[in-house]
Image: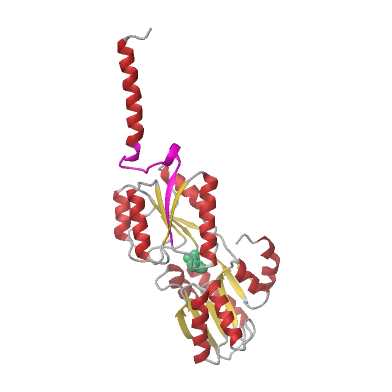
Amino acid sequence: MFGKRAGVLLAAALLASVLGACGDDDSGGGGSSGGGGRLVIGFAQVGAESGWRTANTKSIQDSAKAAGVELKFSDAQGKQENQIKAIRSFITQRVDVIAFSPVVESGWDTVLKEAKDAEIPVILTDRAIDSPDDSLYETFIGSDFVLEGQKAGEWLTQEYQGKTDPVNIVELQGTPGAAPANDRKAGFAEVIKKDPKFKVIASQTGQFTRTDGKQVMETFLQSHDDIDVLYAHNDDMGLGAIEAIEAAGKVPGKDIKIITVDAVKDGMTALSEGKINFIVECSPLLGPQLMDLAQKVADGQSVEKRVLTKETTFTPEQAKEVLPERKY
Ligand code: GZL
């Protein structure tokens, strides 16, 4: 029934479809669309410096699994050069979308221009970059860190309402150059400068880690015997500082009031025990929204340039109520 000509046409059609499929991997635009057309995301994570970061990684990995996304994940151990290397590797592998949490705000233009030239869309998660060229990324999903610092300052203003004695504050800053460190410091300073009784007598990085938070707090305690308040840019540094405060024979939450940011489980536990007085929440659960945004971006849909994460604040009483159902 089939003439010779039909057989040749059929073979040609089969060959074309096979070559066409291979050609997708090398096409200029878009990515490799992993096995069976699955979305392929290359994610360059900051590291594993805090409870927040661990929860953030889990949210992204669990959400990728649930969404059937092929996730190529790299941990930069806190080094920008490792994140840049990872992004270049994702470009070589021709992933569909690159997402990352910039460990610091600056130094990204060159590598993001390479991603743009390769026509691979980029999504910023968690932390922003300070590049003036916002065509280098499709969207930024994360918190408003200045607002978080302002919320911390507003609580302190309320706490010392009507008091006139000087209030000596020490500050544990996050990673130098990181958006949350810069902005939480700026937001807090903007609020407390309205009242001259507030004085930051020492401010130093604790690198967002418990270990460094404890060590720096020890030096603060050695050089100042009149500390009234600690403002730590994340729970982990606050928890390390609590160890130093207790070792110095002082009562955290009473002798030294403590404000932190994040609201991870260990921080909320210390809050419920009164060792921390106030926590500003910063949600690490960015995974589901990231997967949704990445699919839209890969499909060429336009997405909003800025996706703000919803978050609140907690007092000790509120921590006791919500702790049982906290996911992280
Ligand atoms: C905030 C995030 C910060 C957390 C820290 O979005 O980048 O980095 O506050 C984490 O706990 O290390």
Q: Position of residue 28 (x, y in %)?
A: 30, 42
Q: Position of residue 81 (x, y in %)?
A: 34, 64
Residue stretch rendered in magenta on the structure = 24-45
Rendered position, 10 above or below 29: above
Residue shown at the point (46%, 82%) measured from the top left: 203
| Residue 199 seen in the figure | no
Q: Nearer the viewer, residue 151 or 66?
A: 66
Indicate the quadrant where residue 318 lies: bottom right
Rendered position, 49 above or below 73: below
Rendered position, 292 above or below 160: above
Q: Position of residue 246 (x, y in %)?
A: 61, 84
Q: Position of residue 30 (x, y in %)?
A: 36, 43
Q: Quadrant of the C terminus?
A: bottom right
Q: Nearer the viewer, residue 214 or 232?
A: 214
Q: Is residue 161 magenta?
A: no
| Residue 237 seen in the figure | yes
Residue shown at the point (38%, 47%) measured from the top left: 95
